[in-house]
Amino acid sequence: MLDLSIIIVSYNTQQLLDDCLVSLQQAMAPPGGLEIIVVDNASTDGSVALVEQKYPDVHVIANAENRGFSAANNQGAAVSNGRYLLFLNSDTRVESQSLVQPLTYLQEHPHAGAITVRLTYPNGQRDPDNHRGFPTPWNAFCHFSGLGRLFPHKPLFNGYFQSYADFSQTHPVDVTAGSFLMMPAALFQQIGGWDETYFFYGEDIDLCYRIHQAGAQIIYYPHVEVLHYKGASSGLRKESAQIANPPKETRIRVAKESVRAMELFYGKFYRDQYPAYVTALVLAGIRLRGQLRVLKHWLK
């Protein structure tokens, strides 16, 4: 078996995907070798042709329809040959040590069920979504009410982004984004892979929750950085607004899916942990926020 299988889900990000693959070619490879698998979700921008013509060693799976992030990742994992899997977004660029150092950490720390690195935007700002707590009702309330911003260094009020942590040191974290998530293939199989009920958004929180349920830690490893353009496929993020211009239909669908994802996650893991009135309040808040998000993109 190979040391590492890198799985990239692609959807209409041809130039970014090209840049990502170039960076992977330039990065140091693990001693046991690696493979790259691109799963394309019915892009219309020539992404598949680009990979096939320019990167003959990359395994391409070209879907006839957009199957969503979870299902596409599972497709890639199903044909992978690595002892470890790296789920990597197409809108990232890795550094020289971005593969070897996190992989070495996992190999040397069997308690670690997954690892991520410091993701940064092009302006140098750290991507906060890659270092989070679980969206419990209290954490979500503090985040959306603004308490987290008022008390960024207080664990009681900032459990959503956990910005009180020492970001210069390696440490456990509850949730990391699917933008860069490396984990043992055996654990991935053990917990059942990505939940395909999620189409886009929320699936990484779900996966991280099940990694913790399996008794494993998720590690934030800040000693290498990966550039992340953020939201290039969805068009919902201001960080990639200048390089991503998906049609309104895509943005509205993704906005709706982001709300449905939170409803799915809460119903799956939290509904039975909290009183009925708390559940009702949380779901009402999720739906209200979702309506505002959809309206925002409908009016654009």
Image: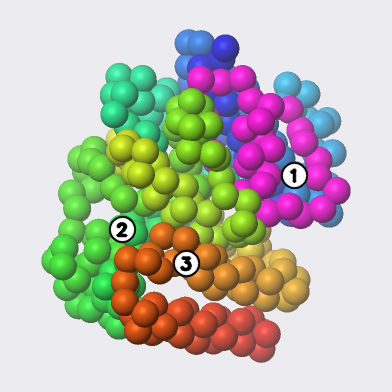
Q: Is residue 171 above or below residue 236?
A: above
Q: Is residue 79 above or below residue 293?
A: above
Image quadrant where one finds the C terminus: bottom right
Q: Is residue 157 magenta?
A: no
Which numbered disc, 1 or 2, marks the residue closer to the eye? 2
Q: Say what secondary structure mark 3 lies in.
A: helix
Which quarter of the figure has residue 136?
A: bottom left
Find the magenta span and give its range: 59-88
Q: Which residue is mark 3?
A: 267
Q: Position of residue 275 (x, y in %)?
A: 31, 77
Which numbered disc, 3 or 2, marks the residue closer to the eye? 3
- Residue at 57 percent across and 26 percent down: it is 5
Q: Which residue is mark 1?
A: 40
Q: Earlier in the sequence, mark 1 or mark 3?
A: 1
Using the numbered discs, state the Cα–Cα distance from disc 1 to disc 2 in whole angstroms. Answer: 30 Å
In-front residue for pair 56/283? 283
Which numbered disc, 1 or 3, marks the residue closer to the eye? 3
**Which label belongs to residue 133?**
2
Q: Position of residue 296 (x, y in %)?
A: 59, 85
Q: Is residue 92 above or below residue 272?
A: above
